[in-house]
Every structure is written in C-alpha cells, then in structure tokens.
Image: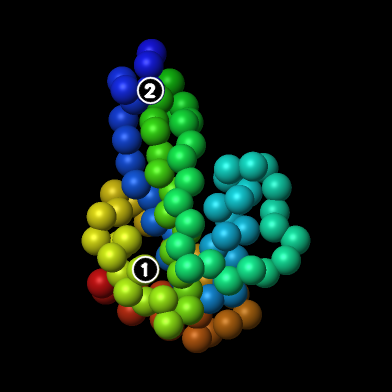
Amino acid sequence: MSSDDLQAYRICVVGSGGVGKSCVTLRLLKNKFAEYYDPTIEESYKKTMTIDSIGYNLEIVDTAGQEEFASFRDSSLDYGDGFVLVYSIISSSSWEELKVRIKQ
C-alpha cells in the first residue's frame, strides 16, 4: 500500500503553555520524552501509523500555548480533524482554559 492510499488526518495538540503538549507529541513520534521545556510557537510533524489494520498518514500539529501566539493556534484549530486536549493536573487554570478551547 502506497502512502497515497492511506487515510490522512490532521491532529491538533491543544492546551495552555507548559502543560506538556510537546512532551506528549514527542512521546508519540520518537518514543521518548523531552527533558527540558522549550516554548513552542507551532510545530507540525508527519507520521504514518497502522491502527486496527488500517494505515493512516497523520499530520500532528503541536500548537502554541502562550497567549501571544493565539493567532497561530486558532488558525490551526480551524483545519483539525481531531484534537488531543492536554492540561496539567496541578493547574486548575490550565483546565479552565481548556474548557474555553473545547467550546471553540
């Protein structure tokens, strides 16, 4: 099966700054965790995966959490097929901000 035959999806990783969006993304892509925090403006990655015997071409968009980059994040969300919502269990404000994103 060629990569052209695979189903394509755009997955957006969304949450406040510093909650671990990039860590979750890198864990999926490279099977390791980031060891330091480097604020992301926006990063896009490609990964081919097989799930339940079906092949997928995934574009994974690691969105910006900082409010000063909200325009980048919001434009990415308009074109997402799926979303991974990330928050910190020790930060109630990250959960509250995520609830606002869910309404969007």
Q: Secondary structure at mark 1?
A: helix
Residue 16 visible in the snapshot: no
Disc assigned to residue 73? 1
- Image quadrant holding the C terminus, namely bottom left
Q: Is residue 19 left or right of residue 12?
A: right
C-alpha gap between disc 1 and disc 2 = 28 Å
Q: Looking at the image, which is closer to me, 47 or 97? A: 47
Q: Are marks 1 and 2 in contact (CB under 8 Å)?
A: no
| Residue under the point 62% across and 58% down | 23
Quarter of the image with the N terminus is top left
Up the image or down, 29 lies above or below 91; here it is above
Quarter of the image for residue 2 reads top left
Judged from the image, the secondary structure of the residue bearing numbered disc 2 is helix
Q: Which mark is residue 35?
A: none
At horizontal 67% and vertical 69% (from top left) the residue drawn is 37
**Residue 17: x %, y % from top left:** 53, 76
In the image, what residue type sits under mark 1?
Arg
* Mark before the other along the chain sequence, 1 or 2: 2
**Can you name the residue that lies furthest to the right here?**
35
Mark 2, residue position: 3
The relative height of residue 29 versus residue 16 in the rendered view (above or below) is above
Against 41, residue 9 (above or below) is: above
Horizontal relation, residue 62 to residue 80: left or right: right
Q: Position of residue 85 (x, y in %)?
A: 44, 63
**Viewer-proximal residue among 40 and 57:** 40
Q: Could you tell me the amino acid type at mark 2? A: Ser
Colour style of the rendered protein structure: rainbow
**x and y percentages locating residue 48 in the rendered image:** 46, 31
Query: What residue is rendered at 70% in x and 58% in y?
Result: 34
Left or right of 42 in this view: 39:
right
Mark 1 crowdedness (10 Å alpha carbons): few <14, some 14-19, many ≥20: many
